[in-house]
Amino acid sequence: MTRRIAVCAIIVLALLRLCHIHLLWADEDYHLAAAINILHGKIPYRDFWYDKPPFAALFYLLIAGYPGWPLRVLDAGYVLVACYLTFRLSKALWGIAEGYLAALLLAFFLAFYLPSAVIPFAADALMIVPHLAAIYFAQQRSPLWSGCFAGIAFLANPKAVFVLAACVVWLPPQSLTVIAGFTEPLVFAFWIAIWSGAWSGYVEQVWRWGWIYAQGSPVSNPFRTGLVRTLDWAGFHAAPVSAAAFAFTRFSRSQKTKFGSWILLSFFAVALGTRFAPHYFLQLLPPVVIAASRGIALAWDRYGRRAAVVFAVLALVPFVRFGPRYAALALDNLRGLPPQWSDVAMDLDSQAAASKIRGLSRASDTLFVWGYRPDIYVYTRLVSDSRFWDSQPLTGVPADRHLSATTPIYSAPAQKNREQLVQSHPTFLVDGLGLLNPKLQPSVYPELRPWLAHYKLVARTKLCLIYRLDHAENK
């Protein structure tokens, strides 16, 4: 009976994300739009700018890039797969009780934390399943499979090199086999990139842009930011963190080496780039909850219900903080009302802009969005007729700062990209940035002004100006 309750609780926790059925979060919309581009016959990196590894775009091909029910059901299924792997790993390490505890903890903390961190399945979240699979096969002493899944994780997120390092620590005598397994999916991906003509674009967009982006962190005090955000994360995750700490006091030397290295390497990945964004901590969650499952079991054996009460009280903090949002969203969905929530104001504005464009467009029309508003592509299912579909590679200012900053980190290539952009003629042009940061509106750039002169304003929202090519009506 207890096991059935645990399974039901895990399923319910995974399905909570269905409350976000009418919303899109930052980054997941980018990958959904990339999937739509692929469905239009475009090759990422070659035919459209895509500054992320390929796994996420391919993942969202499973639902043809659609938001709503398909997206949230897919996300819930992914959570359940992650929970199953967590169960298998923890069970293999200690026993079935720890397996259920670890799966329950993972499902709980993939629901009750900052929505922008746990709802969208972008690079950090999509790495969870191959991350867990890599460590599971390391525990099972299958070095080739362990390395292979670390390689698949790398195709989701370059921070998977830290997963590879953890697998090597878990299997030191077979480290060369682990590394050989790691290279297998990468060699296959490299061959596909060369064959499709995407390799040079991949290097430019993922690695050159990514390296410049990582070097140009907007964080003014990295140490203070890292300390504050780590303590914030640990506070909301006090239940598994304290349970994991308790488990460490009773681990064998071998277990301390394995879990200590896994947690430390995962934290290094979080700290990379000194941004300490909340979704980065998803790489730290698997080792913490698996260690915590053992800690809770040991505490129960020693202290009984007192331990259960302590951990339950600690878990109430994120539940009370983030739980009511699910209820509010569910009620809004049932009433057909938009959520009254500042965090989703831009997405709601994008929905409004997309609605206006759909009312004016034909199936063959194309779209370019100035700013970083990939959700407009998802809601309209239109694509750009050039390689560029947001303004980051055109201004050189990344999306994490372009609402206020103007200093480019990629200025010379950005100018060349603007010169390429004016060779395209999208039917619709949406300025989703100029009203928010006038210093980065498209008319600021001299080479774009003659191009912009061919467009006329046809609609607007609170945050967007929607233009249409002058002769588009007479096509």
Image (cartoon, rainbow, N blue to C red):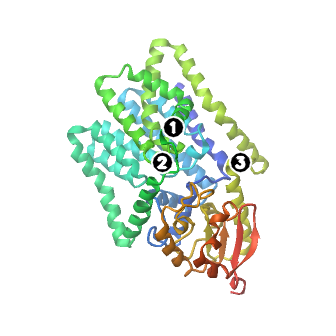
214 horizontally vs 145: left or right: right
Answer with mark 2 or mark 1, whichever residue precedes in sequence.
Answer: 2
Residue at 60%, 80% (x, y): give it: 425
Q: Secondary structure at mark 1?
A: helix
Answer with mark 1 or mark 3, whichever residue precedes in sequence.
Answer: 1
Q: Secondary structure at mark 2?
A: helix
Image coords of residue 82 (percent x, y): 47, 42
Residue highlighted by disc 1: 224
Image coords of residue 330 (percent x, y): 71, 43
Q: CA distance from mark 3 to mark 2?
A: 24 Å
Q: Is residue 377 above or below residue 289?
A: below
Residue 342 numbered tag: 3
210 horizontally vs 187: left or right: right
- Disc 2 marks a residue whose amino acid type is Asp
Instruction: For label 2, count other residues whose C-alpha is less than 10 Å away and answer few (under 14), some (14-19) or many (20+).
Output: many
Q: Quadrant of residue 175?
A: top left
Residue at 48%, 48% (x, y): give it: 124
The quadrant of the rendering that contains the C terminus is bottom right
Of discs 1 and 3, which sits in the foreground? 1
Q: CA distance from mark 2 to mark 1?
A: 23 Å
Residue highlighted by disc 2: 124
Of discs 3 and 2, which sits in the foreground? 3
Q: CA distance from mark 1 to mark 3?
A: 26 Å
> Front-most of 443 and 332?
443
